[in-house]
């Protein structure tokens, strides 16, 4: 089975974000980048599927710059077999990224299973996976919290409002992983050393974005809290504020 995992690099969630001078991008100086957390679950599930089906391979793709090598080597150390950095000029939105990934997957002869994180914590668009499936003309199952698969097919589980939903299907298919799907493994020293011998290459890509950022603005500061009373005396004014000001009851 040919398995492909799409990874993206995002600012560490502990990073203090500063908007750049152009007001269309963030200031990248001093920002620590990591693999998108949801993509970690996707990678782990792809490697588990590879281990279950003899003869399977895992290829990792990312759209970005040369400095993504560090993160791709981590993916190779965890069990992926090869990795590709797709370099593209200019700002990219979800549509452009999906096109670059689809072109690369098609050029590689397609895939039986394509794994992505459910969304990037950078913009929370949750769009690349479904777009990619549409471009590859294969089904897509999103936001997985459970997965069982073999060469014959798969059963996927995801949370929906008020419960859980299970779907059965056959390959090829695109999957997007949610938190709770698995516990990503850590690579040992032996695996880290071996990752240096696995194929990791860079190729150029070109795609036009379907949208452009006009302006980035930080959220407004929250209004200061206020005390409306103490004990039983505070109940009536709190209820009044919730009903007439916050309009939540």
Image (spheres, rainbow, N blue to C red):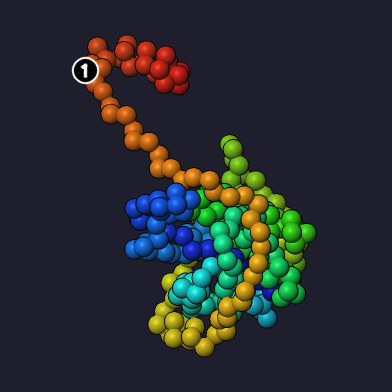
Q: Could you say which is closer to the camera, residue 10 or residue 111?
A: 10
Q: Residue at x 65, y 67 (%)?
A: 206
Seen as rendered, the residue at the extreme front is: 22
Q: Position of residue 122 (x, y in %)?
A: 48, 53
Q: Residue at x 55, y 85 (%)?
A: 198
Seen as rendered, the residue at the extreme right is: 137
Q: Residue at x 24, y 12 (%)?
A: 233
Residue 231 appears anywhere in the view: no
Q: Residue at x 58, y 36 (%)?
A: 162
Q: Position of residue 125 (x, y in %)?
A: 57, 49
Q: In terms of secondary structure, where does tag 1 sit?
A: loop
User: Relative to 133, is 128 on the left or the right?
Assistant: left
User: Relative to 30, is 106 on the left or the right?
Assistant: right
Q: Position of residue 129 (x, y in %)?
A: 64, 56
Q: Can you tell which quarter of the image residue 221 is in?
A: top left
Q: Position of residue 223 (x, y in %)?
A: 32, 29
Crowding at dot 1, Cα within 10 Å, few <14 / some 14-19 / many 20+, comes out as few
Residue 134 appears anywhere in the view: yes
User: Relative to 121, is 49 on the left or the right?
Assistant: right
Seen as rendered, the residue at the extreme left is: 230
Q: Can you tell which quarter of the image residue 248 is in?
A: top left
Q: Could you say which is closer to the camera, residue 98 or residue 214?
A: 214
Q: Can you tell which quarter of the image residue 228 is in?
A: top left
User: Which quadrant is home to the N terminus?
Assistant: bottom right
Give the mark count. 1
Above-or-below relation of 132 to 52: above
Q: Could you say which is closer to the camera, residue 225 or residue 114?
A: 225
User: Which quadrant is home to the C terminus?
Assistant: top left
Q: Which residue is mark 1?
A: 230
């Amino acid at each position: 089975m040919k398995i492909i995992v799409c990874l993206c690099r995002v600012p560490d969630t502990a990073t203090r974000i500063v908007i750049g001078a152009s007001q269309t991008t963030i200031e990248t100086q001093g920002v620590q980048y990591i693999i998108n957390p949801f993509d970690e679950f996707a990678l782990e599930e792809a490697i588990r599927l590879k281990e279950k089906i003899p003869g399977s391979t895992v290829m990792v793709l990312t759209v970005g710059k040369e400095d993504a090598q560090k993160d791709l080597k981590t993916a190779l150390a965890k069990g992926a077999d090869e990795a590709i950095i797709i370099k593209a000029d200019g700002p990219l939105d979800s549509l452009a990224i999906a096109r670059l990934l689809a072109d690369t997957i098609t050029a590689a002869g397609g895939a039986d299973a394509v794994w992505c994180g459910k969304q990037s914590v950078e913009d929370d668009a949750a769009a690349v996976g479904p777009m990619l499936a549409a471009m590859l003309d294969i089904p897509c199952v999103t936001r997985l919290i459970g997965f069982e698969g073999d060469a014959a097919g798969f059963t996927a589980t995801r949370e929906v409002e008020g419960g859980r939903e299970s779907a059965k299907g056959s390959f090829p298919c695109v999957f997007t992983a949610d938190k709770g799907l698995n516990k990503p493994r850590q690579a040992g020293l032996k695996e880290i050393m071996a990752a240096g011998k696995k194929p990791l290459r860079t190729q150029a890509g070109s795609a036009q974005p379907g949208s452009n950022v006009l302006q980035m603005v930080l959220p407004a500061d929250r209004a200061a809290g206020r005390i409306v009373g103490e004990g039983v005396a505070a109940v009536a004014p709190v209820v009044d504020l919730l009903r007439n000001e916050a309009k939540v009851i």
